[in-house]
Image (spheres, helix red, strand yellow):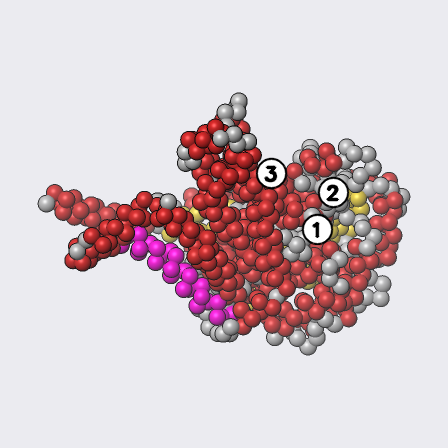
């Protein structure tokens, strides 16, 4: 990627202006089919959502009841929405401090010449192959409060004298349960990213470190991790966006409950837009969610990812 | 040159296909029928209706789409918002139907009902559920009510001599059941609507028809003492912790399973409960002859009678673009004989007069008698009221069950939504 970037830059200065224009036109011509679909399926619906977010509209017939910014006002003052944002941030933070370190560790472990590593790779990656709904259903049955049905409670109640845990039925435990399922599901994906990143690190550098007498931990700390930084940044980026938009798994497991304890922004949007038939309100939630993700994306690209390009130029 | 030729050729081909398929479609009328009878034997009954009709009317194709309850609601909402309703649609009537009708998505069948005495087949109240603004948009197919389904064996074991008829008797029985080491009540807290039945039934027992009607036509309010009182009465029950562990995370199938497997003593549920209990029990048989049913107990000093019923059922409504054939087919599947067939298959508690002959199940007969004799029949609040208010009711009552909302807060939240949606 970095090489391409540099090549592109040089290109720009060498070509004559006429040739450049012609190139742009050719590029545009080839982009037309994609652009058409991009506008119809991405840009147009976004504009439409923005338009409907100013209406009190149930989704049936034309939107006529214009309410201005009232939907936004209501969302931003709704304590349930605040809870949804808070839960989104909680998943983000937990993902970053729990999920990512574990997946780096796993990737490093299955890279080395450990016996049976392809077996472990498959095992760790398998949950990612399941759809979110299947993963959700699996974990719902794991978390069943009745010890005769729920696996985790069956083990837990082996300790004499303890009461079965309520898991998804308890407002204070539900987020933990959901997070465990999310980690289980996405660990393999991030591990795969890191494995790809590790494959790009030239073996010689680490070998040089070994010759210099560095310990395993020193190699990981001072050689592997810094060279893995590009992948870490990508992984963090995907993880944060995924956490903010999380819907499927939580919807299957808890429907955002009990009493909004596991509400996320996407669940909030669905509940209002489709279950309460307040589609205008739902659109406004969608717009806010889009803005939050957009602001994060742009600032993250500016502040963090930029270093990748610079790194590419100066290395 | 060859490339140009091939492009032109393929364009011509596309046109030929488009024209020919359109011409083919014009010969036949298709009636799109969406229903929720997913169980195999029940689906077969519907398929037979469609096949029989198609055999008698070769120019009509009946296109059946069968979906599970929740999937049906989601998909129907989407096609309705897209402005392209199917022709014959399963419906629970009430507030959602009202929304559809207001948006012009349904076909007015008032005139059709007036022809050939079709209207006389149904009781006026049942038919009214599928109408709005004095017009009829559909017909009832199934009408039942909510009551307590209980395990006679567990009740006996707890030393309960007779089923409770008042709220305080009921609470005393719950205590007896708890002392006997059984889970007194199974409830699906995550799905919310099974929990909602308690509060709405209490409200109707305390305030009767007058209180609900006043709140609905806005001369009264959902924050009136009746609705706050309902919350306090329910809180008495919740504070006894009569439900299964982790009930706030349970879905309706869990609830049915707990009762069907004899782990919980009772559930407050509609006429379909025995089927779901059996489906979710280990032996797929449910409670069998240990099953019993009693109506929701009266509240001492309340304005409502123990004979008042809250419930509903299913029916069919007609989409705006439905051809005349659709209405003819609707008539065909709702004759007294057809309804009797459905009743015999355990699909419905029939609404068409003369279809009772198909009903053999003692509980369904008991429920039908209770519905027919109810001085005040109330459609489920969450079907009757606009969707937004219905969801607020469900959400707030879940809050009451979880102990995060007070009875006053619940009533006020419902009133706030009602003021906006009904005002």
Name the residue that disc number 2 marks.
Answer: A165
Label 1 environment density (alpha carbons within 10 Å; few <14, some 14–19, many ≥20):
some
- The residue identified by callout 1 is A172
Q: Earlier in the sequence, mark 3 or mark 2?
A: 3
User: Is A248 situated left or right of B262 in this image?
Assistant: left
Main structural element of the magenta stretch: helix, strand or loop?
helix
Residue farthest toward the front in the current orientation of the protein: A212
The image shows residue A223, relative to residue B190, as above or below, that is above
The region drawn magenta spans A32-56
Residue depicted at 54% across the width and 59% down the height = A269
Q: Is residue B303 left or right of residue B87?
A: right
Front in this rendered view, residue B359 or B217: B217
Counting from the top left corner in percent of width and height, residue A171 is at 70, 52
Q: Residues within 10 Å of mark 3 (few under 14, many from 20)?
A: few
Visible in this render: residue B55? yes
Residue B208 horizontal/vertical position (percent): 75, 67
Q: Which mark is residue A138?
A: 3
Q: Residue at x 72, y 34 (%)?
A: A154
Q: Circle 2 sits in a helix, a strand or a loop, which is it?
A: loop
Q: Nearer the viewer, mark 3 or mark 1?
A: 1
Residue B379 picture quarter: bottom right
Circle 1 SS class? loop
């Amino acid at each position: 990627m970095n090489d391409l970037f540099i090549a592109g830059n040089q290109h720009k200065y060498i070509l004559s202006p006429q040739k450049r224009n012609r190139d742009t036109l050719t590029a545009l011509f080839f982009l037309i089919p994609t652009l058409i679909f991009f506008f119809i399926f991405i840009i147009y619906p976004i504009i439409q959502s923005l338009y409907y977010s100013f209406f009190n509209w149930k989704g049936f017939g034309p939107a006529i009841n214009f309410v201005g910014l009232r939907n936004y006002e209501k969302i931003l003052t709704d304590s349930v929405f605040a809870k949804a944002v808070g839960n989104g941030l909680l998943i983000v933070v937990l993902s970053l401090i729990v999920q990512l370190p574990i997946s780096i560790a796993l990737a490093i472990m299955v890279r080395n010449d450990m016996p049976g590593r392809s077996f472990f790779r498959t095992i760790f990656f398998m949950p990612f192959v399941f759809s979110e709904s299947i993963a959700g259903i699996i974990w719902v049955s794991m978390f069943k409060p009745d010890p005769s049905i729920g696996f985790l409670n069956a083990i837990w109640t082996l300790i004499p004298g303890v009461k079965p845990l309520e898991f998804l039925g308890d407002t204070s435990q539900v987020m933990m349960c959901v997070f465990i399922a999310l980690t289980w599901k996405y660990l393999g994906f991030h591990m795969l990213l890191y494995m790809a990143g590790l494959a790009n690190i030239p073996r010689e550098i680490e070998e040089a470190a070994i010759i210099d007498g560095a310990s395993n931990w020193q190699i990981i700390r001072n050689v592997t991790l810094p060279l893995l930084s590009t992948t870490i940044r990508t992984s963090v980026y995907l993880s944060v966006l995924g956490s903010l938009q999380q819907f499927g798994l939580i919807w299957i497991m808890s429907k955002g409950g009990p009493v909004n304890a596991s509400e996320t922004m996407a669940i909030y949007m669905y509940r209002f837009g489709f279950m309460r038939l307040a589609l205008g309100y739902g659109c406004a939630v969608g717009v806010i969610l889009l803005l939050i993700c957009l602001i994060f994306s742009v600032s993250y690209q500016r502040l963090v990812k930029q270093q990748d390009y610079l790194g590419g130029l100066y290395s | 040159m060859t490339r140009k030729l091939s492009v032109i050729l393929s364009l011509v081909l596309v046109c030929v296909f488009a024209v020919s398929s359109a011409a083919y479609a014009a010969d036949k009328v298709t009636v799109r029928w969406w229903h929720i009878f997913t169980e195999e034997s029940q689906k077969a009954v519907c398929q037979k209706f469609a096949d029989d009709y198609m055999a008698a009317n070769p120019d009509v194709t009946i296109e059946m789409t069968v979906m599970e309850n929740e999937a049906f609601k989601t998909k129907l909402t989407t096609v309705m918002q897209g402005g392209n309703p199917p022709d014959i649609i399963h419906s629970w009537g009430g507030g959602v139907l009202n929304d559809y009708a207001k948006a012009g998505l349904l076909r007015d069948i008032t005139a059709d009902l007036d022809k050939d005495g079709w209207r006389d087949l149904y009781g006026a109240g049942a038919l009214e559920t599928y109408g709005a603004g004095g017009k009829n948009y559909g017909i009832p197919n199934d009408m039942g009510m909510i009551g307590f389904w209980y395990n006679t064996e567990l009740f006996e074991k707890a030393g309960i001599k007779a089923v409770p008829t008042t709220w305080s008797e009921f609470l005393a029985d719950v205590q007896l059941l708890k002392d006997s080491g059984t889970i007194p009540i199974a409830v699906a807290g995550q799905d919310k609507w099974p929990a909602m039945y308690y509060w709405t039934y209490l409200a109707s027992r305390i305030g009767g028809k007058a209180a609900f009607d006043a709140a609905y036509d806005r001369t009264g309010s959902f924050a009136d003492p009746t609705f706050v009182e309902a919350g306090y009465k329910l809180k008495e029950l919740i504070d006894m912790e009569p439900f299964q562990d982790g009930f706030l995370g349970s879905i309706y199938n869990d609830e049915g399973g707990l009762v069907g497997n004899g782990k919980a003593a009772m559930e407050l549920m509609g006429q379909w409960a025995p089927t779901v209990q059996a489906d979710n029990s280990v032996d797929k048989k449910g409670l069998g002859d240990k099953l019993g049913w009693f109506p929701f107990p009266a509240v001492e000093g309340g304005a409502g009678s123990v004979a008042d019923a809250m419930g509903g059922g299913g029916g069919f409504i007609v989409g705006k673009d439905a051809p005349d054939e659709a209405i003819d087919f609707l008539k065909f599947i709702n004759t007294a004989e057809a309804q009797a067939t459905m009743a015999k298959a355990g699909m419905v508690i029939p609404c068409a007069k003369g279809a009772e002959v198909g009903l053999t199940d003692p509980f369904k007969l008991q429920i039908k008698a209770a519905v027919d004799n109810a001085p005040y029949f109330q459609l489920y609040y969450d079907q009757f009221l606009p969707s937004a208010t219905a969801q607020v009711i469900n959400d707030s009552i879940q809050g009451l069950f979880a102990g995060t909302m007070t009875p006053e807060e619940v009533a006020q939240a419902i009133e706030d939504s009602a003021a906006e949606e009904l005002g």
